[in-house]
Amino acid sequence: MNLKTTHYLFFCVTVYFFLGGCTSEKRDAGGLIHIDVNTSYPEKVIGLEDVADIEYLQLEVNEGFLFRDPPSIITADKIIIGQRSNGDVLIFSREGKPLSKFNHTGGGPQDYSRIWGRLLYDEISDEIFVKVSPSKVMVYSSAGEFRRIIPFLEGSNVAEFVHYNSELLLIYDDNDVYPTPFSFVSREDGSVVESIDMPSGQKVRLEIRIREGEMTSVYYVPGRNIVWNNDGFLLSDYSVDTIYHFSFERELSPILVRTPHIHSMNPMVILHGFVEAGNYDFLFTSNCLSTSVKLIFLLFRF
């Protein structure tokens, strides 16, 4: 099982809705998978053991290692939890033993005001990448030693960032500050190295605004723009109806088309990539009108 997917399956696998993407009627002559997000697909129960190697463990907790959030990272050797509520970063062994923790909440140049989203970890360099704002990542060792700041372009909203190789991060910018939504940036200083040229359209905002009297509440629909897949990534820009595969050889190819056209729907139904496991890819849909987002899991095999 791909270790990058472990923490998603650890919390989320129960019953999924099955999409027979490998059947001929779901693919066109070019091999593209077609999904109608308005269709109710037949249900099929899939056991966790069918798509993953199961491992149960109990994290050892004590007064200094208390947490509420799920793991941000699970590797061959470590389990890392980033606590948005208080700024703690907790590191456990794969056996569940506490190893180290740090908290750099503060106002200094090596501090952050909050943890903003998921973490990344590089086992080779022993570096934890902590997103601390929409346009900045701070890098620490697993012992909490400050390494460097990675600034993204001013005004950007980097919704997703993943390791591409030892030198580059692959990012998705939701504010159209970069030349294209998907770009490679340096892991050292955040400088733009290359942008991925792929179709885009009128921006889709994954948020719901509800006005109550003089107050407006904003709810965010969960989204995934970059998902690990086989020898690369699935790239989703919700402004278009196609999900692309981007290989480590930097080849971009469409693999899945959704219907109807997203901008023809009111309310919009978003199709998200979710996680890869056992040669399957899981996706889900969510409705951009209701604050109680309904997750419908779809499953297909390449």
Image (cartoon, rainbow, N blue to C red):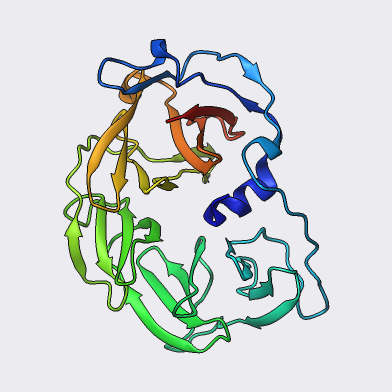
Say if residue 13 shows up in the picture.
Answer: yes
Question: Which residue is rendered at x = 34% and y = 75% of the image?
Answer: 150
Image quarter where the C terminus lies is top left
Q: Nearer the viewer, residue 22 or 149?
A: 22
Direction from residue 66 to residue 241 in the image, left or right:
left
Question: Which residue is rendered at x = 37% and y = 71% of the image?
Answer: 136
Q: Is residue 117 above or below residue 263?
A: below
Question: Which residue is rendered at x = 42% and y = 26% of the image?
Answer: 268
Q: Is residue 113 above or below residue 110?
A: above
Direction from residue 179 to residue 257 in the image, left or right:
right
Q: In which quarter of the view is residue 29 placed?
A: top left
Q: Picture coordinates of residue 186 (x, y %)?
A: 26, 71
Q: Nearer the viewer, residue 252 or 154?
A: 252
Q: In which quarter of the view is residue 74 placed?
A: bottom right
Q: Residue furthest top?
A: 25
Direction from residue 289 to residue 60 in the image, left or right:
right
Question: Which residue is rendered at x = 37% and y = 80% of the image?
Answer: 149
Q: Picture coordinates of residue 218 (x, y %)?
A: 51, 45
Q: Nearer the viewer, residue 37 or 217?
A: 37
Q: Picture coordinates of residue 251 (x, y %)?
A: 22, 45
Q: Is residue 167 above or below residue 205?
A: below
Q: Is residue 248 above or below residue 272?
A: below
Instruction: State the count of labels.
Output: 0
Q: Nearer the viewer, residue 11 or 260?
A: 11
Say if residue 154 shows up in the picture.
Answer: no
